[in-house]
Amino acid sequence: MPLLMAKRALMAAQAGERVRVFASDPGSWRDFHAYAKLAEEQLTAEQLGEQEFVYEFTKQHSL
């Protein structure tokens, strides 16, 4: 669900805006990195904890 929320937020964002996403799944690291590459979005920050993972994207292109 966090990946879908990130995708929707990035679609609505303007170029240069940041989107921060919180996840609890340890496998989310792989998912968010794959999405960033596929969607050509910049994963600008990540914070990996024991039970919470935070990812920050910066929107690259406006549609």
Image (spheres, helix red, strand yellow):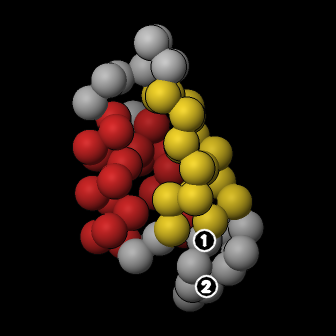
Look at mark 2 in the image and give the residue it sits on.
62
Q: Are marks 2 and 1 in contact (CB under 8 Å)?
A: yes
- Which quadrant of the rendered structure holds the C terminus? bottom right
Task: Indicate which label's residue lies in the foreground, 2 or 1.
Answer: 1
Tag on residue 59? 1
Residue type, mark 2 in image: Ser
Where residue 34 appears, as percent x and y from the top left, is 27, 57
Residue at (51% x, 68% y) in the render: 42
**Could you say which is closer to the camera, residue 4 or residue 61?**
61
Tag on residue 9? none
Q: Looking at the picture, does residue 7 appear above or below residue 5? A: below
34 with respect to 1 (left or right):
left
Where residue 37 appears, as percent x and y from the top left, is 32, 68
**Could you say which is closer to the camera, residue 22 or residue 47?**
47
Where residue 3 appears, as percent x and y from the top left, is 40, 44
What whole-number distance in Å separates the C-alpha atoms at marks 2 and 1? 8 Å
Q: Quadrant of residue 59?
A: bottom right
Where residue 57 appears, as percent x and y from the top left, is 57, 58
17 with respect to 54 (left or right):
right
Residue at (37% x, 72% y) in the render: 39
Residue type, mark 1 in image: Lys
Q: Secondary structure at mark 2?
A: loop
Q: Quadrant of residue 22?
A: top right
Query: Is residue 8 among the parts visible in the rendering?
Result: no
Q: Looking at the picture, does residue 57 appear above or below residue 17? A: above
Q: Secondary structure at mark 1?
A: loop
